[in-house]
Amino acid sequence: MAFLDENYLITNEAGKRIFKRITSLPVYDAHNHANVAEIAANKPYRDLWQLLAATDHYVWEVMRKCGVAEEYITGSRTPREKFGELARIMPLAVGNPVYEWIHLDLRRCFGIEDLLCEANAEKIWQAGLTELAKPENLPLALLTGKLNIGIMCSTDDPVDLLTEHDQVNAAAGRILVRPTWRPDKAMNIQAPAWNAYIDKLEERFGKPVRTYDDMITILRLSHQYFAEHGCRASDHGVTVPPAMAAQPALAAQLFRRARDGETLTAEEVAAYQGSFLLDVAGMDADADWVFQYHAGAVRDVRHSLYEALGPDVGGDVCNAAQDFLPGLVQMLNLYDNRLKVVLYTLDPVQMPTLATLARAFGANVRLGSAWWLYDTPVGMRRQLEYIGSVDLLYTFAGMVSDSRKLTSYGSRFEMFRRVLADVLGDLAERGQAPEELLTDIAVRICSNGPQEFFNL
């Protein structure tokens, strides 16, 4: 098997046949961090660094691990110099999915088959400039052409006006991008910028926010506005999974204290967040939205990075010791059979808890794709095998890119589909299930399953 050849990641004949059935299906990505304004502007990408690495924390972390100075990653060096450092260390990244993603991007999107390394850096850079100048490689053309996007769901703040979404869909002549409602900034009452964010909510909707109920009223207005603009899901990133008990009086008291500038204890923050999430889940249940729950990330652990560059620059880790169960059991019982929920984990240690929880609560509670640090061929295979044996592959929520990078819709979805085909092909060749039924499951996971569950 040659590098990234037609049998890449597929080790059995049944898997090869299954992959042929799903390889050309449109991509349905129910969770990503796309820059919708960039797509709406539809300007040519300047260079390969901008497209492949400028927003990709996976790439940044690999470069740091190889000893590249920060000035060549997020610093003041030119894009060409940064790309040169990426090329120099790329051979050192073999075995990491970043090596495969970068080369899949180059090959599938631009037909560049040279291996990225220091000796080839200038040749590939120049080839990229030529390719990116072509009309078929403008952002909107890439999405609707080579990347074969059916529908993608961005991640958006409750104060957003969503005008860029309307522009993209008008230009595409169909619904291409839907917003996702992410109210984390209102939930994160411990954040230094929380009060300023509540002021933004006031300004956006022209109503004072003096109480917790005032805030919930405005968030309901935002929720309705998003629904009118095609939103079908909310998303919630929780650092410490809170107990989700309804405590309206306590939430109101904590809101007033934080609004007055008081610092809350960790226990008080968790109590506020738990009550907040239950209120938001009620909005989703009423609107028939999907409640997406991302928990377990511990943010910004490397202080030097955070102090120099701020949040979300690659200093985040997972904590397998966190207990998701108590809070989720409270919420799922409160909204049993009334709320669609997708549970994501970034650590395989937590998969048994989430898989058995999804099994216990039936078709409305589903497992999301292997997330972040788990989003590798190894992680995806382990997750799919476990889901198939403990829960049901039929009700798997499907792959999501969770990415800020446009080409990820190609490389990450191809990687996932190949792993999926290989896992299902193994089942067929071991005589555990008929190949035709496994092929149907593959199609469902890649296409009609996400469409139906997320009401796309």
Image (spheres, grey):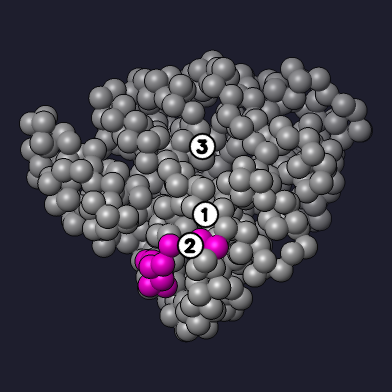
Give the amino acid type for the residue marked by disc 3 in the picture: Leu
Left or right of 276 on screen, residue 336: left
Q: Residue at x 59, y 78 (%)?
A: 43
Q: Which residues are magenta?
A: 107-118
Q: Nearer the viewer, residue 410 or 171?
A: 410
Residue beneath disc 3: 373
Q: Which mark is residue 116?
A: 2
Pointer 1: residues within 10 angstroms few (<14), some, or many (20+)?
A: many
Report the Cα–Cα distance between label 2 and label 3: 24 Å
Magenta highlight: main SS? loop
Position of residue 345 measured from the top left corner of the image (x, y, whole percent): 48, 31
Q: Residue at x 38, y 72 (%)?
A: 111
Q: Is residue 116 magenta?
A: yes
Report the Cα–Cα distance between label 1 and label 3: 19 Å
Residue beneath disc 1: 90
Give the amino acid type for the residue marked by disc 1 in the picture: Met
Mark 1 vs 3, N-terminal side: 1
- Under circle 2, the secondary element is loop
